[in-house]
Structures are given as structure tokens and as C-alpha cells.
Image (tube, helix red, strand yellow):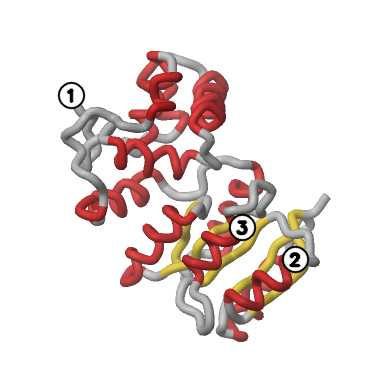
Amino acid sequence: MSIRVMLVDDQVLLRTGFRMVLAAQPDMEVVAEAGDGVEALEVLRSTAVDVVLMDVRMPKLDGVETTRRICSDPDAPKVLILTTFDLDEYAFSGLKAGASGFMLKDVPPAELLGAIRSVHSGDAVVAPSTTRRLLDRFSPMLPSSGKEPEHKELGRLTDREREVMMLVAQGLSNGEIAARLVLSEATVKTHVGRILTKLGLRDRVQVVVLAYETGLVRAGGGASG
């Protein structure tokens, strides 16, 4: 079945360009469009969508707040924030709001398509190094990382799961974690899945945010001691 995509952007030309790219894919279908957040929320009430491509700066309701409202529903579609280099703070806020990741608006088509497929399958949708760069840059927005983790559910993790979580937060991909811990990539993916379940998180992006918020990992990428 095709991946059902919704385009949310106040620039009609941009939506047209994205729609043309997606229409050429046998496994994707643009099922809805909206020019602002209010319209997007209204459309989603009556349209089944798998992945939302979300602009951040729009009239009436911006992409961050729209994302927050969409992701408050446990059965919500995945949200992929679209941003530019000078709007990193919006991307960070979008991740905090529940987005599964973010990409630059001028990303090559192949990367955009790959990201949509990754989002749909539940895998990582942002380069770990990019996620780390954002978190490092905006670490002053987070609580002090010198304290012990306060998220009570962290205590439910096994030692191995905690180890995997710290490596995810330090910007390592599943393959890199597998090599570091001498595990198969499939085993690492299983650990990440269990971490998500135990902590009640949507995806590995939220794992990274939580690890920084609780002090499990310090801004800069190191584990807290």
C-alpha cells in the first residue's frame, strides 16, 4: 500500500514541487495539502495520512504548535519538519513537540524520499550528527545535565538498554552502535524498540531529547558520570 503523504506549507509553489516529486514514486501518494496549521488540523480529521511534511513558519498556526496538536493523538501520523539552516530553533522545538525528525527545505529529492520512507517505517529520520548539533546548540534550553536522571522510567531499562540509549543520544546510528557493542544491527534495533516502549516515546529522536533533558548524556555528546 502506498505511503499517504500530506503537504503542509503556505507556499503553493513549494507544495507543487514536492507533489511532483512524490507523484513519481510508486510507493507514495499525496492525499492532502494545507496552507496553514489550522487547515491542516481540519483536513486530518477526515483524511487518513501516514506522514505529514510540515513547514514551520505559516500564518494562523505555525508548524511547531500544529505538530504538537497532531502528535497528542496516539494514532497520529508521523511528522517530518521542514526547515532551513537559519531556523534551527524551530526544528528543535518541532522535535520537542513530537516530530519524528526534520530536514532542510532544499534537501535533494532522493534524501527527502528516503526520509519519508524511514519515517513511515519508524526508523531514524535525521542524521544523528545533525540531531546532536541541534541539541548541543540549544543545550541552554535544557535543564542542567549535572544531575542524576529524573525520569523515573529510566530505572526500568536494563544496563544494556541504558548503554544503547546513551549511544543513540551521542549521535551513533544503529550500525555504529552494533559495531561499538559487538552486536548485530538487528539486536540493536530490538533494544531501541524496547527503550521506546518502556519510556513511552514515539521514536529515537525523542530518546535523544530525553537523554539530554534528564542528564543521562551531557550536551557535547558525553555520558554523564
- Is 25 drawn above or below residue 172 in the view shown? below
- Choose mark 3 or mark 2, whichever is in front: 2
Residue 225, labelled with which disc?
A: 1
Mark found first going from the N terminus, 2 or 1: 2
- Is 142 drawn above or below residue 23 in the view shown? above
Residue at x 51% of width, y 64% of height: 108
> Front-most of 87 and 146?
146
Residue at x 58% of width, y 57% of height: 79
In the displayed structure, does residue 99 sit left or right of residue 146? right
Residue 13: percent from the left, percent from the top?
60, 85
The CA span between labels 2 and 1 is 46 Å
Amino acid type for the residue under numbered disc 2:
Arg
Q: Are marks 3 and 2 in contact (CB under 8 Å)?
A: no
- Choose mark 2 or mark 1, whichever is in front: 2
Using a 10 Å C-alpha cutoff, classify the residue at mark 1 as few (fewer than 14 neighbours), some (14 to 19) or many (20 or more): few
Q: Which residue is mark 2?
A: 45
Residue 216: percent from the left, percent from the top?
28, 31
Q: How many marks?
A: 3
Amino acid type for the residue under numbered disc 3:
Leu
Amino acid type for the residue under numbered disc 1:
Gly
- Choose mark 3 or mark 1, whichever is in front: 1
Using a 10 Å C-alpha cutoff, classify the residue at mark 3 as few (fewer than 14 neighbours), some (14 to 19) or many (20 or more): some
Residue 136: percent from the left, percent from the top?
24, 49
Mark found first going from the N terminus, 3 or 1: 3
SS of the residue under disc 1 = loop
Indicate the quadrant containing the C terminus: top left, top right, bottom left or bottom right. top left
Using a 10 Å C-alpha cutoff, classify the residue at mark 2 as few (fewer than 14 neighbours), some (14 to 19) or many (20 or more): few
Residue at x 31% of width, y 32% of height: 150
Residue 16: percent from the left, percent from the top?
66, 80
Q: Which residue is mark 3?
A: 113
> Front-most of 90 and 188?
90
